[in-house]
Each structure stands twice: as C-alpha cells, then as structure tokens.
Image (cartoon, rainbow, N blue to C red):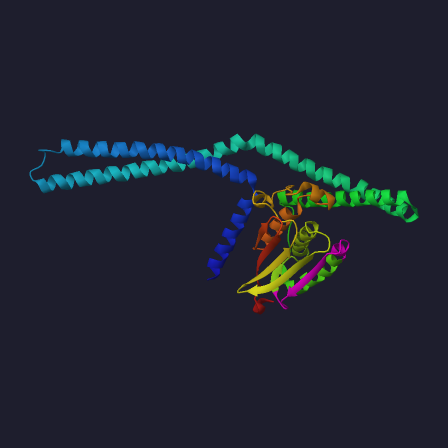
Amino acid sequence: MESRKNFSRLFEELVIELKSNLFLRARLRLALFYIGVIAALLLVFSLTLYYTSAQNIKENADGEFLSEQAQEAFIDRTVNRLQSELLLIDGAIIFLVGGLGFWLAGKTLQPIKESLDIQKRFIADASHELRTPLAIMKTSLEVALKDARGESSGLLSSNLEEVERMNRIVEDLLVLSRIDNKQEHLTFSATNVSELILKFIRKMSTYAGRRSISITQEIEPGLFILADADKLQQAILNVVKNAIDYSNDGETIAVNLKRAGTHAIITVTDNGLGISPDDLPHVFDRFYRADKSRSRKHCGSGLGLSIAQWIIHEHRGDIVLQSSPGKGTTTTILLPLFPKRHR
C-alpha cells in the first residue's frame, strides 16, 4: 500500500514537472511526431510485406509436402515466425526512432530554449534591480505626501499608486522567475485553512472597503490541509483580489469553505463583469487580461492567477473558473484535506 502511494506521488510530481516545463513538453511533442510518422510508414510497409510474403510462402509450399496437414503446419509456423520478426524489427526501429527523435527534438529546440533562458534571466535581473529604486521612490513619495497640500497632494497620491502597482508587478515577476528556475520552494505543514481564510478576509476587507465592496463568508471550522501557509494565502488572496478588481463599486463578494469528502472546497464568487467564453481558456496565462482597461485601472498585471494556479497545483489541488459576461465569476479551489491522525 505504501509503495503504491509512493508511486502515485512520484507520478503526480512527474505530471506537475511536465505541466510546468514548456521546453520539455515541446520536445516530447516533436519526438512523438517523429515516432508517429515512422510508425505509420512502418505499419504500411510491414502489412504489405507480411501479406506479400505470406502469399508467396503459401504458393511456394504447394507440392512440397506429403500431406495437406503438414503443409498447413509449415505455412502457419513460417507465417507466425515472419509476424514475430516483423513485430520485433518494427518495435526496435520505433524505440530507436523515439530516442533519436527525442535527441533531435532537443537539438532543434535548443536555440529556442537558450532564447527563453536569456529572457528569464533578464526578467529576474531586471526585477531584482528595480526593487531598490522603487522602494526609494515609494519612501520619498510617502514623505512628500505628508507635507503636500491641494493639487500637489492629488498628484503625489497618483504617483504613489503607480509606484505601488509597479512594486506588485516586480514582486510577481520575481516569483515567476523563481518558479521557472526551480528556486521557489514550499515548506508544508498541517495548516488550519479555516483560520487562514478568516485572517486574510479581514485583511482584504480594508482593500475592498475603498470601493464600498463587502465580503461575506461561510467558513466551515476546523479544516486542516498540508500546506505552505504563506504561499497558500498568497494564492487565495490573488483570487479574492481579482474578484474585487473586477467587481463594480458597492457589490458583494462571497468566500466559502466547506468539506467535500477528502477535500476542502474554497469558492470565491462575485457579481462583476464576468469573462467572455473566448477569454476564459486564457485566464491563467501570464500577462493575460480579459479587460485590459479595467485591469489597468485597478492595478492588475495579469500575473496573479498564473501564480495562484502554480501554488494550488504544488499543493496537489486544482483551481477552476466559471464565468459569464455580466453575471460574475466563481473561482473554485480544490485541496486535499490532511487527516486528523497525522496532525
């Protein structure tokens, strides 16, 4: 039983690695294309050779045996041997083509991989270098804002909001660069997700209150999961912030948590703008924003849901969005519960 669990865990880790590695997915797809082409050619060639050879064997065997039974036995043995040899040869060729195809795919995609690696390093380095000047600008604006009056106060407040927005984008870019470079590590422990959600709802209520948006909650108490509390809170916070940003002033957002068998289900529902069917498949793509003017107004960067999805998947969970234009959006997060006996 334990070995089966270990195998299942290893398989899940391999699937997560495959999902997160764009280069590996492209390499495998290209290798499978090579294998498919060769397999199709081999199938046509082998079937033609098999039926032609079988017919020749039957024709050449006429008159060579004392009895009809002996002739049929010889034909069957020869045809079966031919079938086995063809299967063995085809299998060996496909195996060799698979290995060669995987190697060739790596060579073919190597320039693209190098280009992506350079891009990742640039994003990581640029984000890191931007942190210090942004922090200085933020501090200077906050100091200047204390003594500002009239029109200059509004101008400084606007500039401060833009600097804060850039700070959030830079922090998100740093997280994504660490994810891409396998440097973002999670530390798991038994976590009371019920208390976790209640805490961050209190934090987000202030943010929502700026636009007279209220957050209702229905939280089932005492639900534990194996989690990195900080990262999980970041994921859920990104989802709730997204719901706030895409809601109209004065609306209500509902955050619910309940048990469903061996899993905890978190739902975040808003009655805001909604997402069109064309945009829905892309909501977890990096930098993708369904309504760019709306996102820009409320400091969206198109990175929050992408980060949230990665965090949820690292917790062996899943996240799904359901939405209709003008009717709002429901985000559902599914996380495996942590058994009481292991806490």
Quadrant housing residue 330? bottom right
Q: For the magenta stretch, what is the residue range?
A: 206-223
Relative to 102, say whether 202 is above or below. Answer: below
> Is 149 placed left or right of 327 in the picture?
right
Q: Residue furthest front?
A: 326
Is residue 338 visible in the rendered structure shown here? no
Question: Image point 52% across, 30% down: which residue?
Answer: 108
Q: Position of residue 195 (x, y in %)?
A: 68, 64
Is 87 contained in the magenta span?
no
Looking at the image, which residue is at 24% across and 37% down? 82
Residue extending furthest left? 66
Q: Is residue 2 above or below residue 289?
A: below
Q: Is residue 100 above or below residue 141?
A: above
Q: Quadrant of residue 52?
A: top left
Q: Residue at x 57, y 30 (%)?
A: 111
Pick whichever, 176 or 65, lies toward us: 176
Q: Is residue 289 left or right of residue 95?
A: right
Where residue 6 appears, x then y in whole percent?
50, 57
Residue pictured at 31% horizontal, 39% vertical: 87
Would you say residue 209 sits in the magenta stretch?
Answer: yes
Between 87 and 334, the one nearer to me in the picture: 334
- Would residue 306 be seen by someone viewing this image from the given angle? yes
Where residue 248 appears, as percent x and y from the top left, is: 70, 51
Viewport quadrant of the C terminus: bottom right
Of residues 290 and 259, which is closer to you in this image?
290
Q: Report the side of 53 relative to 170 (left or right).
A: left
Quadrant hosting residue 279: top right
Could you tell me residue 3's position as x and y percent?
A: 47, 58
